Image (cartoon, rainbow, N blue to C red):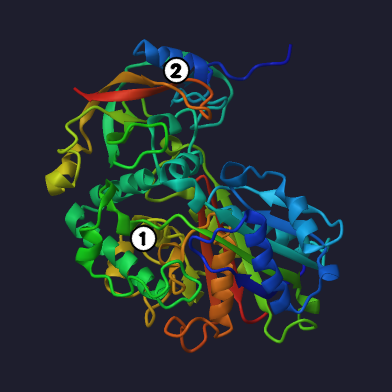
Amino acid sequence: MRDVAIIGSAQTKFGKLGKSNTELFCDASLAAMEDANVSQKDIEALFVGNVLGGFEEGQINIGGHLVGALHLGNIPATRFEGACCSGTVAFRDAFMWVASGFYDIVLVGGMERAMIMGTPFSTRTFAMANDCKYEGTTGITFPGVFAMVARRYSKIYDIPLDKLREKMAHVSMKNHKHGALNPHAQFYQKMGNLKVEDVLNSTVVCDPLTLMDCCPFSDGGAAVVLASADIARRYTDEPIYVLGVGQGSLGHMGAQADITKPASRVFSARSAFKQAGLGPKDVDVVEIHDCFTSAEIVASEAMGFFDWGKGADAVESGQTDIGGRPVINSSGGLMGKGHPIGATGVAQVHAIVEQLKGKAPNGNQVNPVPEIGMTDTLGGGFNTIAHTILGRSRR
Amino acid sequence: MSKEFYVLTSNDYHEGLKNNKLLGLRCKNCGQITCPPLPTCQWCGSTDLEKTELSGKGEILTFARVYVPPESFEPDYIVCLVRLDEGPTIMGRLDYDKDKASLKNGNASQDIIGMRVRLDHLVIPGDKFSAGERVMPLFKPI
């Protein structure tokens, strides 16, 4: 396998945008291609993460339309769907095609426009990521999944629910603080100074989770250009290298041994660490799939950053904020930045690229400029999980 | 005719539920129980399975009170995961005092975890995405 580098990356503003899926993808892609100094003829294949295009605007088979819109000739385009993990699943595949030597330069991105669907329909379609025969029938939602995770966590580690909720609130406070500083974030200049009480006293969406324990629905797109590391410096002075990738799977929630310790995430993170020849202690900055406050906590443990049951204490103590290590969700994460589900994984990669180039938004940049970053993306009830490990130096 | 690996299909399983019968699979290789049905044993992966009826009894592992439902569901219900006496865990609704199962009951709401329950069922109409009516376990305290 060859080394692979990110030579350009970009994201659109996240929020309520009033643009089509194709428009969101193309806005992000053309910006990433500009950042990479590549032209249309350089791109050999297109990989796209998109989940709900059919429900959102009646668009499936979107790959060809993206190639047409971007004037990329007749190159192959493939859509990847792994619920909220779709962007990272697409990224991992794009990486493998370049690493294998099949392509030298590819474009990978993702997008979603959920806002137009409204909350009930969005919630219905998001919930389709659960097992439709044995879970979806009950009316389980994703706030429901992570409400169940929170209660289970409280029980297993004997942390009273009210104490756990206070610890969880720190995830929301930290990520919104960073989101408020990020001009591309859905909540830019909003909610940057939340207090524990603001999170606890917000509307209960799915008991025991409040609205401020949850990420928003979002529109947005993100894209990166990947190239063989050998040619990356022809295009950029600041290639960011893909040191490792991982992906893991699990069936329905009932068949999982412990929903606070998803085995798919452990498998995926370990795969990525093994490929990179690195471990959790080597990671400076990480974008974690904080769809809910409890989600960030259990993810930080399964990735190996903290012992089981200690992730809640870590966030409460500020260990995962800037100044601590690893810094989690300095971009604002899904909570502060937004969660256009097909784009999210690629936007996480973009956020890490910005950190490793020293170009993160003012107030969110980790100093000194970090060497190693990581992304963690979750689809469904731990059914699809994928990771990337990125670095400033080639392996 | 090609070989069919499902000894118990989702239709069979849901028909059972409608009669308050919880159907599962006993593995002839490892002896353990799979529920809901799969073509393979959820513990050892064997395809040598036989249909069996379970007790429908178990204990609450965790739960959530859902105020904001997906379209086509009526709001405010409790979803739960139940570890069955025979070993597997399944998802269902919980028929219980909703205020006791929520923050209104503070830390005491956590006492529901571990509660013994028995199987009943609930049927709600399908929507255009559900491939028919929706049949689910409805667990009641013992």
SS at mark 2?
helix
Residue A176 lies in quadrant: bottom left
Which image quarter is the C terminus of chain A in? bottom right
Task: Give me the chain letter of mark 2.
Answer: B
Circles 1 and 2: CB atoms closer than 8 Å: no
Residue B75 lies in quadrant: top left
Mark nearest the camera among 1 and 2 is 2
User: Which residue shows up at 38% across the image and 30% down it?
Assistant: A138
| Above-or-below relation of B58 to A78 | above
What numbered label is drawn on residue B14? 2
Image position of A235 (left or right of A60):
right
Task: Name the amino acid, label 1.
Answer: Ile
Task: Name the amino acid, label 2.
Answer: His
Q: Which residue is mark 1?
A: A297
Image position of B79 (left or right of A216):
left
| Above-or-below relation of A106 to A217 | below
User: Which residue shows up at 48% across the image and 32% down it?
Assistant: B43
Residue A270 % position (x, y): 54, 59
Residue A316 lies in quadrant: bottom left
SS at mark 1?
helix
Disc 1 crowd rating (10 Å Cα; few below 14, some 14-19, many 20+) is many
Residue B37 % position (x, y): 49, 23
| Above-or-below relation of B58 to A203 | above
Q: Is residue B6 visible?
A: yes
Residue A208 % position (x, y): 25, 49
